[in-house]
Image (spheres, rainbow, N blue to C red):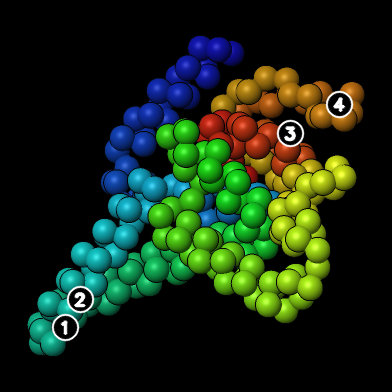
Amino acid sequence: MSNIDDIDDILADIAVDATPQETRDLQELTRCWVAERVAPELLPWPEDVVERVLERIRRQIELVEDQTGDMDPKTGFRLIIVQTELERFKFLVRSFLRARLRKIDAHPLHILNQHTDSLESSRPLLSASEHQYLTTHQSLLAAHYNSSFLSQFPAALQRLDDTTGGISMVDKPDEDAAIFARCLRDVGEVSIEGTETRIDLKRGDVWVVRWSAVRQWVELGDLEVI
C-alpha cells in the first residue's frame, strides 16, 4: 500500500509541475477563499498567492485598456476572454477580503493579539493594509465608546480588554465550531480535546470535526477546509 501511495505522490507532483502558474494561483486562491469563509477563526494572510494574483489583475487591466478600441475581430474576442477571466479573479479577491474583514470587525482585539504573536513567525496573521484598518477602526470605536458611556465609568472599568475577575472582555470566535475537512496527507491519530475520541486522519478522508482539533494541520496544509 505504501508503494501505491508513493506512486500517487509522484504522479501528483508531476501533475502540479505541468499546471500553469496562473491556474495553480487560481486554485490556491479558491482554496483560501473557501477556507476563510468556513473557518471560524481568521487564517494567516496568504501573501505570496495574493501578490501574484493582484499583479496578474494589474497586467490584465493594462492589456484591456491598451487594446480596447482595436477593430480586429480576433482582438475583440480575445479581450472578451481576458475580461471574463479578470472578473473571476476580481470576484474571488473581493469575496476573500470581505470574509476576512467580517472576522476583523467581529473580533478586533482578539485578532490584534493574535497578529502580534504571529509576527514572530514567517506567516503574519494580517496584511499591512488589514493591520492598518484594524488599528484605525479600533481607535475610532474606542473613542466612540469613551465619549458615549465609558467616560462615566470608574477608570478601572473603562478598558475594553479587561480580564480581571477571571472574565475576559475580549470577544473570541467559537473555536469548537464544526467544520468539514479533507485530508491531503496522512496525519495519523488525533485526539479531540475534552473527550476520549480519537480519529485517524488519512489522505482522502473527509471529516466533520471541531475546528480546534484540526486547526494546526489546516495551517500546515495537511488538511483543507471544504
Badge 3 or badge 2: first in the primary sequence: 2
Q: CA distance from mark 1 to mark 4?
A: 61 Å
Q: Nearer the viewer, residue 164 or 210?
A: 164
- How many angstroms separate mark 3 from mark 2 (CA)? 46 Å
Residue under pointer 4: 197
Q: Which residue is mark 2?
A: 64
Query: How would you rate the neighbour count of disc 1 (Cα within 10 Å): few for under 14, some for 14-19, many for 20 or more?
Result: few
Q: Is residue 210 left or right of residue 82?
A: right
- Looking at the rendered structure, the kind of residue marked 1 is Thr
Identify residue type, mark 4: Thr
| Closer-to-camera residue (146/201) | 146
Say the numbered circle drawn on residue 213: 3
Residues under numbered marks 1 and 4 in contact, where contact means CB atoms less than 8 Å apart: no
Q: Nearer the viewer, residue 35 or 194?
A: 194
Question: Dot 4: what SS?
Answer: loop
The numbered disc on residue 150 is none
Residue at 47%, 17% in the rendered image: 6
